[in-house]
Amino acid sequence: MRTPLATMCFLLFWAQSASGQDVGFSQFFAAPLYLNPALTGQTECGRIGLQYRNQWPGIGKAFVTYKLSYDQHLPEIQSGFGFQVMQDQQGNGLYSRTSAGGYLASQVQIGSSSSLAAGIKLGMLQDALDWNAIQFPDQLINIDGTTGEQPPAQTSRLTPDFGAGLLFSFDDRLLIGLSADHINRPYPGMFGEDHRQLPMRWAAHIGWRKSPNSNRYLKSDDESLVFQPNILFLQQGNFRQINAGLYVSKHQLVAGSWFRHTIATADALQVMVGMRGNGLTVGYSYDITISGVGLNAGGAHEVSLNWELCIERETKRKVRAIKAPVF
């Protein structure tokens, strides 16, 4: 299907105003490697992650994202490794960005109740433009449907992409993280004199895990009911965003809500519900748009699935896994 020029202009304008802003998932911790490379391997088993996001469906597949990841802990070296593949399609596939990367993280115990983890990402980015999907005004006039517009010298570009992150955990209750992506500032542009670099993306998050039934002086805590307030700050170029939210879990059921606010204006209210059990977690979230884009854009739907594959358990971790929210 051809994309009208008006739609293309809207998407290009949005990309310009967002200064190359990356995909923003609502279920942040369901994409642990994307949020912070230091979260790689923070499980007892191998973990497969799938995620789908459809933002502003009312505009017509404006932004659709797919993500696949896998990570695994290696107890022999107190480290974890993983990989992630993600594609973000804009304008019904008119413009897409595909990324792939390998992740490595190492963790050390600090005292009896704290640990510190550091991780890196080595990856690639490919930006691609489907020139044949664009419908120009002169194609509507010409009988043969041809256009005089000339495509750019190249319609795809492949560049290296690096990232890193740190993670600190205290007593399985306090979690603090800091990560940086696009450290090498890739050049994704495909139009002649466009030499702009992709801005670095910074993410800082802090969260607290609390059960009203727990007793910090006893090991036999009853944590069937758990509250997890979190704050996440994102910055990429001139774009800055604050996310504040709360997860509440009761046995296998998890529910949560986040409020997303840019420095200039309120953006969206996110609501989420999920289930977990036997190593499997499934979540659904919806973004209620309250910004100038309007409710007619359709908000954003997001679905996540994470599955821990416990094939081997005879080798125990020397450093216990850092507990983080699952959505």
Image: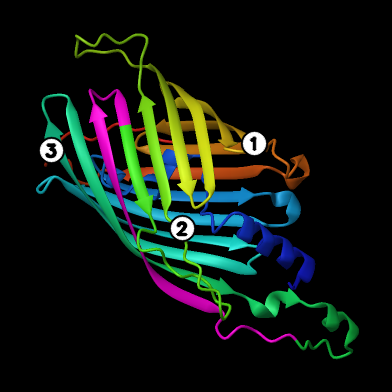
Residue 157 among magenta residues:
yes
Is residue 91 among the parts visible in the rendering? no
Contact (CB < 8 A) between labels 3 and 2? no
The residue type indicated by label 2 comes to Pro
Amino acid on which the number 1 mark rests in the picture:
Thr
Q: What residue is drawn where x is 54% and y is 48%?
A: 239
Q: Name the residue under label 1.
A: 265
Magenta part of the chain: 149-175
Is there any visible trace of residue 302 in the rendered image?
Answer: yes
Given residues 131 and 266, the one toward you in this image is: 266
- The residue type indicated by label 3 comes to Lys
- The image shows residue 34, relative to residue 175, as above or below, that is below
Residue 240 image point, x, y percent: 52, 43
Q: Viewer-proximal residue, 5 or 60? A: 5
| Residue at the (29%, 23%) spot, across then down | 173
Judged from the image, the secondary structure of the residue bearing numbered disc 2 is: loop
**Magenta stretch, main secondary structure class:** strand
Q: Distance between the residues labelled 3 and 2?
A: 40 Å
| Residue 159 among those drawn in magenta | yes
Picture disc at residue 199: 2
Which circle's residue, 3 or 1, is located before the other in the chain?
1
Q: How is the image coloured?
A: rainbow
* Quarter of the image where the C terminus is located: top left
Q: Name the residue under label 3.
A: 316
Residue 168 in the image, given as x and y percentages of width and height: 25, 34
Q: At which x and y percent is residue 250?
A: 44, 19
Residue 238's disc number: none
Query: Mark 1: few, some, or many residues within 10 Å (few <14, many ≥20)?
Result: few
Q: Where is residue 19 in the image (x, y as percent from the top left)?
A: 56, 57
How many neighbours does mark 2 have within 10 angstroms: few (below 14), some (14-19), or many (20 or more)? many
